[in-house]
Amino acid sequence: MASSTINVPNASPVVGSRSFLSRLRNGDEIARVITFLFAASVVLITLLLIFELWTGSALPRHKFGLHFFFTKVWDPIAEQFGALPFIYGTLITAGVALILAVPLGIGAAIFLAELAPQKLSDPLQFFIDLLAAVPSVIYGLLGVFIVIPIMRQFIQPALKNSLGFLPLFQGPAYGVGFLTAGVVLAIMVIPYIISVSREVLMSVPRDQREAALALGSTRWESTWKVVVPFAKTGIMGSIFLALARALGETMAVTMVIGNTPTISSSLFSPGYSIAAVIANEFTEATGDMYLQALIELGLVLFLLTFILNGLARLLMLLTTERGSGMGQV
Amino acid sequence: MVVLALAGLVLAQSALLINGAGATFPYPIYSKWFDEYHKANGTQINYQSVGSGAGIKQVTEGTVDFGATDGPMNDDQIKAYRAKNSAGILHFPTVLGAVVPTYNVPGVTSALNFTPEALSGIFLGRVSKWNDPAIANANKGVNLPGNDIVVIHRSDGSGTTYIWTDYLSKVNSDWQEKVSKGTSVNWPVGLGGKGNEGVTGLIKQTPNSIGYVELIYAAQNKVPYGAVKNSAGSFVKADLASVTEAAAGAVKTIPEDFRVSITNSPGKNAYPISSFTWLLIPEKFKDTAKRDAMKGFLKWALTDGQGAVENLSYAKLPKEVVDKELKAINKIQ
Amino acid sequence: MNARLRWRKLVSGFMLTMTGVCALVAVSVLFFILGYLVYHGGNAINWDFFTKLPTPVGESGGGMANAIVGSAKLLFLASLLGVPIGFFGGIYLSEFSGSKVAFVVRYAADLLNGVPSIVIGIFAYALVVLPFKHFSTIAGAFGLGLMMIPITLRSTEEFLKAVPRALREGSMALGASKWKTIMHVVVPAAYRGIMTAILLALARVAGETAPLLFTAFSNRYWSPGWNQPTASLPVMIFTYAISPYDDWHRQAWAAGLVLLGLILMVNIIARVILSRGVAVPRS
């Protein structure tokens, strides 16, 4: 179309045609180079991080290979390391978190997007954004002193009495464990689900709703059967984003999960997550194999969140294109 | 913000700061010592109680100036230190302490008696209820509930774990075979707490739990702890006398590097789960000010400092050991 | 109205009420958290907390003065790393770059943003602590600064892009060079938005604990200069919360209140400024 020099919409329209010397004299070329270096440093740092994770985990990768992912044993003395209990714990707690947070989050998002008048919806969203700003260690603090006792004294015994025939709810009620960690994580990821889903729902074109209502559906039916499916990919994106957050969460989980590398079918059982074991054992890993096994766990976590974040962005991209540009997302 | 930064810089010029990390076992007495020493001559010794495992690791890496552990470094670790730092590392015993079985059993306020079989059975997961005969037979007259036992161990690399597993390995061949001893072991059952502090905290909050902590943690936090049957057959509770007696046998034969285990030691009233705890001091210091400060502190801790230990339920070092150590301080260059 | 319609209307009313309940639950969690912190922490906050150093373990009293200053130093240093890279990088993306380069840089920034904070800690340990053989404020600030980069980068780019073209064209028509246009016209126009974005980035990393665990470590005393371990509010909260001492629990609540109070205050101020839309003037 236009000349090859015009490639960014709001860049100066005459950038290519001035001579190099005049650009240099004006300081433009220097500015370009300097700002480029800063931008490039971001890429370099990221590459360096991946490099460090990869080389820092060389020993266990060579020794255990893919077995690392399927071994249950974590024995620093015998130098036998397996990631399975940590992967299990990470996934289970994230799973519990999503099961609790997704219905609640989408419900709240529907309320904020469809039902609440602007004057109510915006301030409520403001508060929910504030919830997203609460640091992990504060959730951990509340987890230790409030959630754990409530779980141990009320919720876990109640679950045991009513649903104890399920293997999920068997075993002694410690208070700490997968369920507690899942509950704390759920509280932490709800704001993400709500804010992204709300934006996506609000960007669904009005005519969709109105067409459904015109055809005689109730308010709920038009929301649930027309608007939400329209925004489906964006909502999925928000769930992936929340999942990525839940997987990488360290402090709150470490304080309530029980710190035991166990795989158990019971949600009451104490367990361990990848981030928690790194936080607890990194400074004391004597011996290269031990330390590098922990770094390999870090690499695994990095890859998991990387894939999830990528999927989330993809889904969000697909949604904005579908939303036919109604409002900014 | 700028003012604070400048303030930070100004404070930089004041007293000497030495960094150490390691065992949580002696943390109460160390923190008291460092505070007293700081008041006496201004040297700031910043000690972080992160567990013996981390103490060994960080002093080997050189990221802290000294370490502390209740599980002495093994030969491989000493070799690794020498390889990384082209000099050796010295162990200096500082106090004697005891690891006690603490518990939180609803309705039980007295001190329970534990046999070696009971303890190893509980931690192996074989004894799972409080009213199991292994426990009940030693505690006739105590009303033990039929609740499940919640085992609590350390989640971090711990010298206290080393002492506990060292004892269990000596008294139970199954334990020796299945789990053996170390600062970080493959626990058959239980929850993990971080540091002696974390374990005590968990026990306080978790009914029907049992764990192992250094004596002062149980005492300061008013958590009941039990007596253990020693090799002479008597049930002994940890206190100054029983811990001192446990060390008495080892005093004559203590090796030159001071690495010795005194668990399950002979002696009619010896407490079987006692141990020295060591400071890990590098043989060579690059910074002479730090070296002199460290030597000064060691001399103080081994002499004046010993006066403060009994208040915190640690036992003083035997005189012969102190004498040997004072001589060994000269090895630090 | 037939029965089926009545039923559907009932369901509709019920479900919509449920969504209201969901929203109520979500929002009330925030107030519940704040309420608890104020209740527990409010009792514990006293003058000592802000001015005294920690006492030996097991003894009551003392405060977290060194942790407060430590956190301030960490944030100051972190912004020295995170803000320039984000700011100038954002300028590059918005004003100079071609779309391919912009895509790569943005992708890298998104990647960095998604890295779990504990992994950032590993990276900072390997890069700063080991070579210098020191736990230090610098190492901790490096980790926190890394986490600030993606936020400041993306925000700078977005706010600069939102400045109307006419402003740029007008400036260049008057003969100003590109660089002068950027520094004297475009950036000042987007100034407020960028400042609030930086504040939000600071608020985000102020509460991070995991990257500090093996970089800044912790310190019972004042941390002199920048090359020594330092106490920080989040790490103290963690250490005290899992301990068995009631006095330490008390102090953990107080620290939690102070930390959350500051973070929320910054967030509220920043968001109010942004939402008023005065970040970028309409031309």
Image (tube, coloured by chain):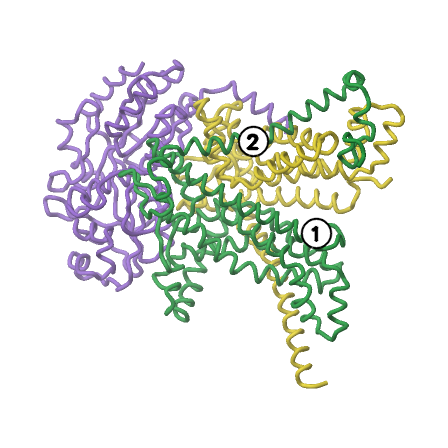
Chain colours: A green, B purple, C yellow
**Which residue shows up at 42% across the image and 67% down it?**
A159
Chain letter of disc 2? C
Task: Report crowding for label 2: few under 14, some 14 to 19, many 20 or more residues within 10 A (C-alpha).
Answer: many
Residue A37 is left or right of residue B326, and the answer is: right
Q: Position of residue C101 (x, y in %)?
A: 66, 32
Hey, which residue is sitting farthest bottom in the picture? C2
Q: Secondary structure at mark 2?
A: helix
- Tell me the kind of residue under disc 1: Glu
Quadrant into which the N terminus of chain C falls: bottom right
Tag of residue B210: none
The residue depicted at 74 percent of the width and 64 percent of the height is A208
Depth order, front residue of A46/A275? A46
Residue C115: image location, x then y, percent: 53, 40
Report whether residue B143 is seen: yes
Residue C74's disc is 2
User: Above or below — where is B124 with respect to A286?
Assistant: below
| Residue B201 seen | no
Percent coordinates x, y for residue B47 in the rendering: 40, 30
As drawn, the label of residue A321 is 1
Q: Amino acid at mark 2?
A: Leu
Asked if marks 2 and 1 fall on the same chain, the answer is no
Left/right of residue C31 with respect to residue C167 in the rendered view: left
Q: Is residue A76 above or below residue B59?
A: below
